[in-house]
Amino acid sequence: MLQLFLRSPKTLLTLPPKTQPLISFFSHSPQPHHESILGSPARVQKLIASQSDPLLAKEIFDLAAQHPHFRHSYSSYFTLILKLGRAHYFSLVDDLLLRLKSQPTSYSPSPALFTHLIKIYGDAHLPQKALRTFYTMFQFNCKPTVKHLNRILEILVAHRNFLRPAFDVFKDAHRHGVLPDAKSYNILMRAFCLNGDLSVAYGLFNKMYERDVAPDVESYRILMQGLCRKGQVNTSVDFLEDMMNKGFIPDSLSYTSLLNSLCRKKQLREAYKLLCRMKVKGCNPDIVHYNTVISGFCREGRAVDACKVLEDMESNGCLPNLVSYRTLVSGLCDQGMLDEAKKYMEVMISKGFSPHFSVVHGLVKGFCNVGRIEDACGVMEEILRHGEVPHKDTWMTIIPGICEEIELVRLEEVEIKPSTRIVEAAFGLENYLIKRIHASKTWRG
């Protein structure tokens, strides 16, 4: 490997003009007592940093160290350790850390080295090695910062089996002179909430005040979401009130969690009141908040109230999107409010939104079920005019009604696929619908 390196055109070593071969040059040229055959410590560090192959960089490191009076710089250790770590040569990383620690004149590794190593082990899903690296800092008399603490906590709680070790690291932090901040508490509170240990999370929240750590908006949101998952939505609303009384402005995610939980608990009146209060309390409702309440009303058969929410959002400068219209049209159809549903579908199409096939099918089926075949055909005309292809089930719903109403020739058995168009369905149906479309265009012209 070394001979390959010496011959490599990518090496930073260059031959002086009119000199002897490179091997001979290294073997016979007198070297200062502090340099290796590869040059000074700074030169060696540059050679190591320039190599894309971490194993070749390690060979350069070892070759330089063979000189009895040569001592690597800390930068060489730092560079090589990170190269090997990023290439997942973790056993070599451990060996270098031991060599670094055993230097006659001990180096003082920078916190940055351990920051990078902890991240490398975290990205490699090796929480145990990340935790060991965190404690290795103390062996080098390198005091961790709260950023190191938060990083190791994030890595550990990402693995369910390491939630308890993460809690132990957190509790020991004070003993090592590291003071957890709001982010430290938030990391653990979120982990315990997701694990269903709401009481532990609540205890951590109270502990923040005892230790003069001010909770932030995220702290409240984490507990509110945890309460909502447990079905304790009223307690979560109380938390929201407490949060605002203490001068915090809830963020968008806090309201989303509460609105969703209130709607699922069928507390729609409270959900609508909370939606109306948001703007007053400094958080403008967005499309997600409005759609959550629209969906809640439609799910409970209150499509008229959902229409009111749609009107509110437009008056407040929030434009309905595809989900808003699809949810509302489906809700109106489910309640038999077919004319209102058709009106909103037409508005939806006029704004460039494509109705889902289930929306079209529900509207067509609704009109057919009450004998309003003309209106069902009107829906089909509108869809076809905008280049949409109705689902095969929609064709199967409307064709019998058309044939019965206008006494067309008997409908032969036809294989109808999702891509079926008029001409493939039936000759008589094709002529009928095309005439209707032409007549409609002529009337509108």
Image (cartoon, helix red, strand yellow):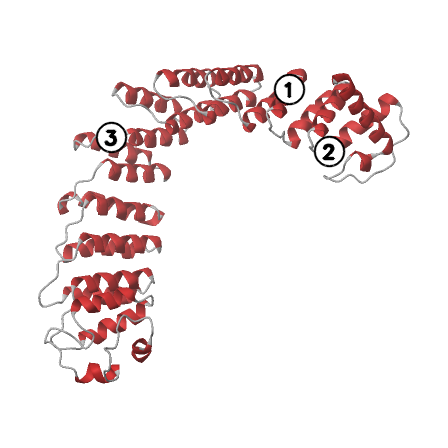
- In this view, the residue in front, 124 or 162, is 124
The relative height of residue 385 versus residue 22 in the rendered view (above or below) is above
Mark 1 or mark 3, which has the lower sequence index? 3
Task: Where is residue 72? Give x, y as percent.
Answer: 16, 68
Q: Sort mark 1 into few (<14), some (14-19) or many (20+) by Cα contacts within 10 Å.
A: many
Provide the residue designation for mark 2: 393
Mark before the other along the chain sequence, 2 or 1: 1
Measure how far apart labels 2 and 3 are at the Cα level. 55 Å
Q: Quadrant of residue 60?
A: bottom left
Indicate the secondary structure of the residue bearing disc 2. helix
Can you see residue 334?
A: no
Closer mark to the observer between disc 2 and disc 1? 1
Circle nearer the N terminus (2, 3)? 3
> Which of the pair 38/152 is nearer the observer?
38
Vertical placement of 191 versus 257: above or below? below
Q: Which residue is mark 1?
A: 341
Instruction: Identify the residue shown where x is 31% and y is 32%.
Output: 218
In the image: residue 441, left or right of residue 86:
right
Q: Where is residue 116 shown, x and y percent of the image?
A: 26, 54
Q: To which residue does mark 3 refer?
A: 215
Give the structural element (helix, strand or loop) at label 1: helix
- Distance (Cα) linking label 1 and label 3: 47 Å
